[in-house]
Image (spheres, helix red, strand yellow):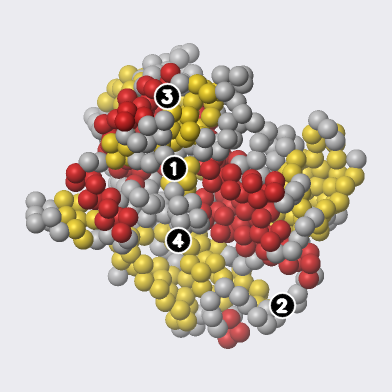
Amino acid sequence: MNRAVDLVIIGGGSAGLSAAKSAYENGLKDILIIERSSELGGILNQCIHNGFGLHKFKEELTGPEYAYKYISFIKENNIPYLLDTLVYSISPKNKEITYSNSEEGYTTLKYKALIFAAGCNERTQGQIMTPGERPNGVFTAGLAQRYLNIDGYLVGKNVYILGSGDIGLIMARRMKLEGANVIGVSEIMPYSNGLNRNIVQCLNDFNIPLRLHNTVTKIHGKNQLEGITISDVDDDLNPIKGSEEFIKCDTLLLSIGLYPFNAMLKNSGAKVNLETKGAYVDQNLETSLDSIFSCGNVLHVHDLVDYVSLESEIAGKNAAKLVLEGRKIYDKVILTSHNENMSYLLPNEIKVYDSVENILFSFRVKKPISKAEILFKDENGNIIEKFNKVDLLPSEMVQLNVSDLPLNDINSLKVEVRAL
Amino acid sequence: MENEFICIVCPKGCRIKVDNEGNISGYTCLRGLNYVQEELTCPKRMLTSTVKVSNRKDTYVSVKTSSSIPKDLLLKVMEELKKASVEAPVKMHQVLLKNIFDTNVDIIATKEIK
């Protein structure tokens, strides 16, 4: 079967839905959202806790409620979407994708613009190579969350958590409330990787200890997990001999980070940002491939869904503009770079048109900085813009909406974060 | 003794200080001030969980308290939620359990089940 649409959006989670809404509101009506699972909303459906939407909607929502706002918009405006549909390939040269589902079979779809919003994956046991056995009972935190919140299945009774990422903290509270004994959380870094509010309301409220500079050094159990050994680590993150402690547990949850699920775009030839593992993008969130945009967690991993939505609106708007107005000619391309205190910076390049609107910059710091200045410098090191920020943390992405940069006068842009 | 609270109202996580005389500082919005005042008197939390949908196979509907409830009631309410079930269809924000433990707080659905 063959089809054609103006805009195809791969992924029906928070990024895809926000991008669809934004494209629609910017005048583009011929849109198709393709979603792999059997409902729209993506990972928000299993995030039943509250705390979403404070920036975007100025109210505190649960994940399903946040998704509902967008799903309602999609349904009210009859924006088409496909569920249980898997995309196999993107061909940027022919501007087409292939997908299949049980109704249409194998289908080729032509697009004028494509937004890649496929989300992220959890890092697994294999990626940190925990020493010891490989028994049942070791889960990524998000998988355990899915089993519990969607399928109603509690994966264990005596639980230990490795990694202090937000999903791990949320799951510590959730399993405790469901009657499990949550023994503790180990974090290899000297600081938590989760939001402060989650340390308070998920761990402190339930007297669950958080061990910093500590990690799992052995997994015990042939078929079923019988316990783990945890150890303190030194400043180089190597386990300290003599600090080992055996902990009896039947479940180990891993909350050790997320990474963009960007393989399909990479395999299609898109330039990759080696620091984020997502696509290399300009300020409109267009990738190195013609008319293909990327946004949300597949571009870089976010902490807050509100920021996913704000970012995806940019992709949606620019995809709509590209289809409706055609490609505009730009004068030059400014490459961006960052200093050693930051782990990445987006966008990777800025295309300078006669009128450049606000530019959304996103970055993370490598270590906590209590008082910081953020400097925007040209190729000669002259400061062209400056911001002050407090309490920067690696676990909290910074987004800055910057207007009026003198782009015509500069040839490169370096953003620097300095501790004051 | 000076007390420091990390505000849990929003992801910003402001550090709010309370000194010996009870002066509160460091909050950046009124919700933060209210949070600490409540934390000093009667700490409250929102509770979210799931309730079984009796007429759909392996289906649970996500729920929340309509507003925050005293912290020491969390586990008691969880027991009630484990016993409860609801019949589909369920509407968004449909009340599933009314005035739980006389708190004037309801348990409401946070999802639609068709």
Q: Secondary structure at mark 1?
A: strand
Q: Position of residue A83 (x, y in %)?
A: 72, 37
Q: Is residue B36 left or right of residue B45?
A: left
Q: In the rendered image, which residue does mark 4 sit on?
A: A398
3D distance between C-alphas at marks 1 and 4: 22 Å
Q: Is residue A240 left or right of residue A374?
A: left
Please say if the residues under marks 3 and 4 sit with CB atoms less than 8 Å apart: no
Please say if the residues under marks 2 and 1 sit with CB atoms less than 8 Å apart: no
Question: In terms of sequence position, does the residue under pointer 2 or pointer 1 come before the other?
Answer: 1
Q: Are labels 4 and 2 on one chain?
A: yes
Please say if the residues under marks 2 and 3 sit with CB atoms less than 8 Å apart: no
Question: In terms of sequence position, does the residue under pointer 1 or pointer 4 come before the other?
Answer: 1
3D distance between C-alphas at marks 4 and 2: 28 Å
Which of these two is toward me, B104 or A324?
B104
Q: From the viewer's perspective, is the residue at label 3 or at label 1 nearer?
A: 3
Q: Chain of mark 4?
A: A
Residue appearing at x 85%, y 35% in the figure:
A104
**Quadrant, the N terminus of chain A:** top right
Residue appearing at x 86%, y 54% in the figure:
A94
Q: In the rendered image, which residue does mark 3 sit on?
A: B81
Q: Chain of mark 2?
A: A
For residue A50, the mark is: 1
Q: From the viewer's perspective, is the residue at label 2 or at label 1 nearer?
A: 1
Q: In the rendered image, which residue does mark 2 sit on?
A: A330
Q: From the viewer's perspective, is the residue at label 1 or at label 4 nearer?
A: 1
